[in-house]
Amino acid sequence: MCTDVSLDLVTIQRYYHVRWNIETGYRYFKELLGFDQYQLLSFTGIQRFWAIQFLTQNFLESQRQEWMEKQADLTLGDVVRRIREEYFGQVIVYVYLQALEKKPLFDILRLLKLSA
């Protein structure tokens, strides 16, 4: 939908494509990264929020560009999911190695800040 009736369909589609990227970017920050839970109580809090958001966006975009050399058409959401999967895999390997060393389960859980 478009309120400017003078635009042709191709232009509307181009605008919508740009807008879609903006909307999905906001969704990633709000839902995937947990920024929807951030409480802004002061001017300093607002500044910190934008600094964290800026750094996160740049990190994810940098990682996306690096991974797109091997795999095209990655979204920031794809990058977040891949980072989470890799991190989870590292946790599993760590737990496995600790188990091989016969470390007590409760010590591993305490170190990972998890409950049984």
Image (cartoon, grey):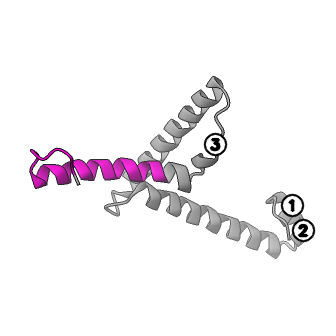
Q: Secondary structure at mark 3?
A: loop
Going by the image, does 28 lie left or right of 45? left
Q: Nearer the viewer, residue 37 or 86?
A: 37
Three-letter amino acid code at the position of disc 1: Arg
Magenta span contains residue 5: yes
Q: Assess whether mark 3 and mark 2 are in contact (beta carbons under 8 angstroms).
A: no
Q: Is residue 94 above or below residue 48?
A: below
Q: Quadrant of the N terminus?
A: bottom left
Q: Position of residue 22 (x, y in %)?
A: 36, 47
Which residues fall within the magenta stretch?
2-27
Tell me how far mark 1 sits from mark 2, CA to CA.
6 Å
Q: Which residue is mark 3?
A: 38
Q: Residue at x 46, y 58 (%)?
A: 77
Q: Assess whether mark 2 and mark 1 are in contact (beta carbons under 8 angstroms).
A: yes
Q: Position of residue 68 (x, y in %)?
A: 35, 57
Q: Is residue 23 above or below residue 115?
A: above
- Please report whichever mark, 2 or 3, sits nearer to the chain's N-terminal start: 3
Q: Residue at x 39, y 50 (%)?
A: 23
